[in-house]
Image (spheres, rainbow, N blue to C red):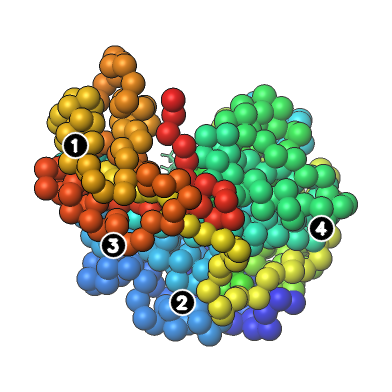
Amino acid sequence: MLFGSRKITVIPGDGIGPEVTSAALKVIEATGVRIEAEIRPAGATVFARGIDSGVPPETIESIEKTKVVLKGPLETPIGHGNKSANVTLRTLFETFGNLRPVRELPGVKTPFTGRKLDIVIVRENVEDLYTGIEYMQTPGVAQALKIISRSGCEKIVELAFEFAVAAGRKRVHCATKANILKLTEGMLQHAFEDIAPNYPSIEAKHILIDNCAHQLAMRPEQFDVIVTTNMNGDILSDLTSGLTGGLGFAPSANIGSDVAIFEAVHGSAPDIAGKNIANPTAIILSAAMMLRHLGEGKAANDIEQAVLVTLESGVRTGDMPGFGKPISTTEFADLVIANLGKVSDTSAARTFEPVKLPPREKKVAAVKVEERKVTGLDVYIESTLQPKELGEELSARIEGTTFTLHAITNRGNTVYPVKERAVSLIDQYRCRFLSRDRNADVGDSEILALLTRIGESAQWMHVEKLQQFDEEDGFSRTAK
Ligand code: NAP
């Protein structure tokens, strides 16, 4: 048992959330496991109360105490609040890993039926573009920060391997875009390659994310566990849900060092809310994952087997293709309850060991280096000048400083000093200034003097120091 308590927090959520969550609670109750549920709000009703995070103090207090949450989907109302309540919960309780298992289910016909798909996406859950840090750099140019840390990569890779070991899986793929994003996506690849040798019984393979998407459509049965960054994982896991029957069947677990949040992958589906027609399978399977996490492996297996037996019997909910009359949310849950204790004809119960999780680190995560220096500066400038004019103007302006203008790029294309090329330009230029003395460590006073000079004629809005760590460039090169 990972966490001692059987008290859990239940967030019914929005739209179809209350219907499917109460179906899952009925199923849990029928297994005989005694769970004490604290029902707490989050999402639309909380935004309407004027709480910008979508999560009120009473819900936070409950989760701090219980450490385990069964959560319905939360709507993010457009025009209210700064954040999604889901992102608030994930970041507040640092549930750094999102496990999204999908498998072929009996009676759920898809183009892949018969190929025995059984894939788990392990998605990093708190970094990447989902930190939601964005800026308007000019009135017409927006920027989002993709933040990836070595410690975040190590945690998610370890979770993927530990999960693979606990679940008796054979292979872990790490899917990245490291060929283009060498520093951010590349960091996950490097962490994966460094950690994989600690798990010699698991086959470890790196794959580029675009090829991974292609392979998932062509030969998905080759995949077992896939670990990936937040945005890539968001997209891939919806894709894998689609391969096996859709969102109505996809459970998930958000795992942190202290808190775990279990929820269906689907949203609040407002179009079918209140009609008692939503498919509750995803949240019922999420509840099984929660019970396993609480050390109730038998009850978890019983629920999974009962879901399989129910689907084998040929019933269908409205989201499943087929001809028979669809059954309701409550009828489906009642059938699962009636089938508790029965054994599936198509898939045996699985054995899981508890997943070993890293403890929460109190100290600030940092990678130590022997040597570091600043070799130059990238200054982002808003300008409608042509590159040649801007380059000549800046070069003249910085004469006498310790810097030279090395290059100007526009959307990644080097536009100065090169022959004019027929590229469409936007009014955001990245201007790279390097120290005239290539061995120097540039100080802040020199940087401020440079910015003052530039600011006399140009509008700069963003600056990045070009740093070297142990003689490795900590920045991407400008393209030739
Ligand atoms: P969605 O709620 O997942 O619904 C998309 C469609 O999928 C629904 O219209 C419905 O299709 C079908 N569907 C989803 N779950 C189903 C179920 N259990 N049974 C039967 N059909 C199901 O996605 P969305 O419309 O993009 O998002 C709606 C709201 O949910 C948004 O506010 C979004 O921010 C939020 N959301 C929350 C979470 C979360 O809390 N984790 C996740 C995703 C989205 P039909 O039209 O065919 O009936």
**Relative to 446, does residue 418 appear above or below in the rendering?**
above
Amino acid type indicated by mark 3: Ser
Q: Quadrant of the C terminus?
A: top left
Disc 2 to disc 1, C-alpha distance: 67 Å
Q: Which residue is mark 4?
A: 198
Which tag is nearer the camera, tag 4 or tag 2? 4
4 or 1: tag closer to the N-terminus: 4
Q: Which residue is mark 2?
A: 39
Q: Is residue 298 visible?
A: yes
Taking the image as shown, residue 122 lies to the left or right of residue 79, namely right
Residue farthest to the left, as pictured? 457
- Say which residue appears at 24% left-offset and 67% top-offset: 48
**Relative to 437, does residue 21 appear above or below in the rendering?**
below
Which tag is nearer the camera, tag 4 or tag 1? 1
Q: Which residue is mark 3?
A: 445
Q: Residues within 10 Å of mark 4 (few under 14, many from 20)?
A: few
Amino acid type indicated by mark 1: Ala
Return the x and y of residue 166 as percentages of the image width and height. 80, 61
- Say which residue appears at 43% left-offset and 61% top-offset: 86
